[in-house]
Structure formats: C-alpha cells, structure tokens
Image (cartoon, rainbow, N blue to C red):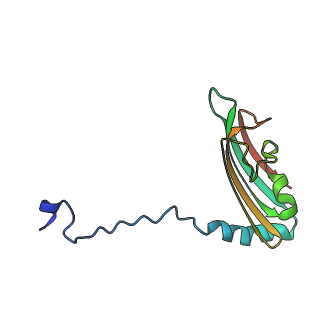
C-alpha cells in the first residue's frame, strides 16, 4: 500500500502542522522591553492607519501604541478617542497590556469614526 493506492505518502502520516500565526507571546516581550525603556524616559509612541470604506461613512482603522502609561492613550489618533475597549462600532478589537509603568495597546476598528479622514497615516511621539 504505497502512494498510488491511498493517495497519501508511504510514511502514513503527514508532517504538516498548523502552528498558528507565530506571534503568540510577542506582544508581552515587546511591551516588556520597548515599553519599559520608553516609560523610563516618559515617552509614548503611537502609529495608526485609517482608510475609508468605499461608498460608506465608515473607516477601517488599525492603530497601536507603546510607552509610559500616562502617555500611551494620548498617542493614539484623535478619532479613536473613547473607542479603546469600546463597543460603539460595527467591529472593535482592542487589546491592552500593562506591565509596571509601561503600557501597550492595539485596536482594529471598522465603523463610523467622527473626524476620521478618508486616508490617514498617524505617527505620534509624546
């Protein structure tokens, strides 16, 4: 019973394994290292991109921030104010992590966002 009769390799089992996305604990180590370093100098760095969904009033926004707790939320784009952990959009996936004086947050939003431009690339260092 080889490959011709069963359609499977002669070894019997496939070596293919689904290992996921490969970034399981990456956020923890990123906040642990980069976030704590930035919190020591009292800085927060935020980056985000927003694109208008054609023929709608909605945007797709992906944003992230890392740094000192007091500066982190302020470094997100202004049109995401109040949406970190909120439920007022069609889709809102928010993730936050706090380790000592450092904080990291990421969010993906699909829905109407007041004051969001049709296309925006946001970079903020506070």
Q: Quadrant of the C terminus?
A: bottom right
Residue visible at 73% across and 58% down?
A: 105
Residue that lies at the very extreme toward the front in this rendered image: 87
Residue visible at 76% across and 45% down?
A: 122
Q: Quadrant of residue 99?
A: bottom right
Q: Quadrant of residue 11?
A: bottom left
Q: Quadrant of residue 61?
A: top right
Residue visible at 11% across and 68% down?
A: 1
Could you tell me residue 95's position as x and y percent?
69, 58
Q: Is residue 5 left or right of residue 113?
A: left
Could you tell me residue 113's position as x and y percent?
75, 38
Q: Nearer the viewer, residue 2 or 43?
A: 2
**Above or below 83: residue 67:** below
Residue visible at 18% across and 69% down?
A: 10
Could you tell me residue 115's position as x and y percent?
80, 35
Q: Is residue 5 left or right of residue 82?
A: left
- Asked if residue 49 shows in the view, the reply is yes
- Asked if residue 125 shows in the view, the reply is no
Number of marks drawn: 0
């Amino acid at each position: 019973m080889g490959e011709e009769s069963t359609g499977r390799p002669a070894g019997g089992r496939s070596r293919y394994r689904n290992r996921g996305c490969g970034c399981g604990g990456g956020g923890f180590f990123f906040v642990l290292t980069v976030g704590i370093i930035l919190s020591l100098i009292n800085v927060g760095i935020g980056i985000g991109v927003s694109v208008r969904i054609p023929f709608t009033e909605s945007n797709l926004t992906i944003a992230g921030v890392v740094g000192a707790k007091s500066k982190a939320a302020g470094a997100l784009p202004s049109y995401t104010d109040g949406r970190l952990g909120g439920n007022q959009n069609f889709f809102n996936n928010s993730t936050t992590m706090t380790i000592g004086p450092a904080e990291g947050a990421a969010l993906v939003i699909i829905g109407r966002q007041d004051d969001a431009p049709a296309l925006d690339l946001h970079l903020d260092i506070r």
